[in-house]
Image: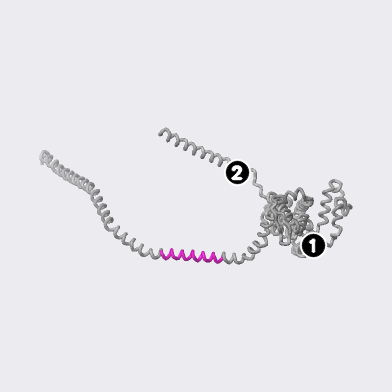
Amino acid sequence: MDENQLTPKQPTQMDDAVEKVVDSSVENVVETVAQEQEAPVAVEEAVVEEAAAEVVEEPVVETAEETVEEVAEEPVKEAAVAEKKEKKKKMRTYQQRQDRNGYMFMAPWILGFAIFTLFPFVMTIILSFNAVSSTAWGYQMEFIGVKNYINAFVGNQEFLPALLGYLRMIIPYTFIVVVLSFIIAYLLNKINVGKGLLRTIYFLPVIIMSGPVMQQLLTAQGKGDAASAAATAAKTTTNAYSNIFIMQIIDSYSRPLANGLAGIFDWLSVILWFTGIPIVLFINGLQKINPSIYEAAKIDSANAWQIMWKITIPMLKGVGLIITVFTVIQLGMFDAINPMYELIEEKTGDLSSGLGFAATYAWIYSFIALLLIGFIFLLFKDRTPKDIKARKKQEKKLKKLEKYQKRRLKSQKRHEAKEAKLYGK
């Protein structure tokens, strides 16, 4: 075959093949484009159909279910509310019963307090402003204002010496009782053998030497020569202890101090009598201190003196406050060493003109005792560190500045509002 016959046939077959491939590819492209254009429309139609079905079907089902649940839950809620109300009523009735029982148990004490304490308390205030005299028809009161208080300090020669004697007695005796009871309690707490026996021995005077017994013992010492002994007390007080070398040194340095110490030695039995209850309270406070604190202090190389001053005494401040207040009150109620209490008793027994003065003396004495107790509270009060005090002062200053700024802002707003009203801004 010639080459001229073969060459025209080959291009025609290849052209047919190319055309077929091109046609198939074009058809595929057109189909994909059509599918891509139709797909979002189908998706949108499906979404719309689903939303319409939800809108049509779901609310009906949900509302039906909700109504059924609400109808079923309403009685349950009502029953729960009713149960809560019943429980509250029961609790109220239980609390009311408890309160009623408590008031019934306290009724005798409340009645006794109202009759024997509150009524005399109010009557004492009234009597202190009246001149009371005893007549055939009973007591006659005449209002005189504050004349009883003026006469107590100015016109009476018994009140001021008795008041000064009370102050001279209460301050050193309270100090000695508290310090001595702390020392004895501290030593008893360190002892392991015979601790209970020693505590009993120190507490026995409180049980045996009760008020009447102690009064009889003191009156047996000789009331007959009490006046002469009081007149020469300043000269002869230290004679019984003049042979003691320490007392001679103290006497040469200060005679009043030596006389005071001699008086304390004379009343040493009374002082030991008053240390019974404070010793027990101090031992109780010492036993409540955690031993691990002492162990930590010993690990930090603290000696016994530092432990006592830095740990023991600061942790016994609360107990010391109670013991000091108790000692002041207990010493004040003992007429053998408290001339003020004895004077009030004498004026109370004087029915002719003594009830008004007795009430006045009692109120002045009570006021002085309250001042001493207030001083004791200040003495045992916890001191805040200096850095905390400075921080609190700064906080107070900042609060004041904030308040001042708020006031300025308020005044500025008021001024602006006034200007706006005046000028129409």
Q: Which residues are magenta?
A: 78-98
Residue 392's tag is: 2
Q: Main secondary structure of the magenta part?
A: helix
Residue 329 in the magenta stretch? The answer is no
Q: Position of residue 46 (x, y in %)?
A: 25, 53
Q: Position of residue 314 (x, y in %)?
A: 69, 51
Q: Quadrant of the N terminus?
A: top left
Dot 2 or dot 1, earlier in sequence: 1
Residue 291's tag is: none
**Which residue: 85% across, 57% down?**
226
Q: Nearer the viewer, residue 418 or 157?
A: 157
Q: Nearer the viewer, mark 2 or mark 1?
A: 1
Q: Quadrant of the C terminus?
A: top left
**Which residue: 55% across, 66% down?**
97
Q: Quadrant of residue 391?
A: top right
Q: Nearer the viewer, residue 421 or 200?
A: 421
Q: Nearer the viewer, residue 251 or 156?
A: 156
Amino acid tagged 2: Lys
Q: Residue furthest right?
A: 243
Residue 215's tag is: 1
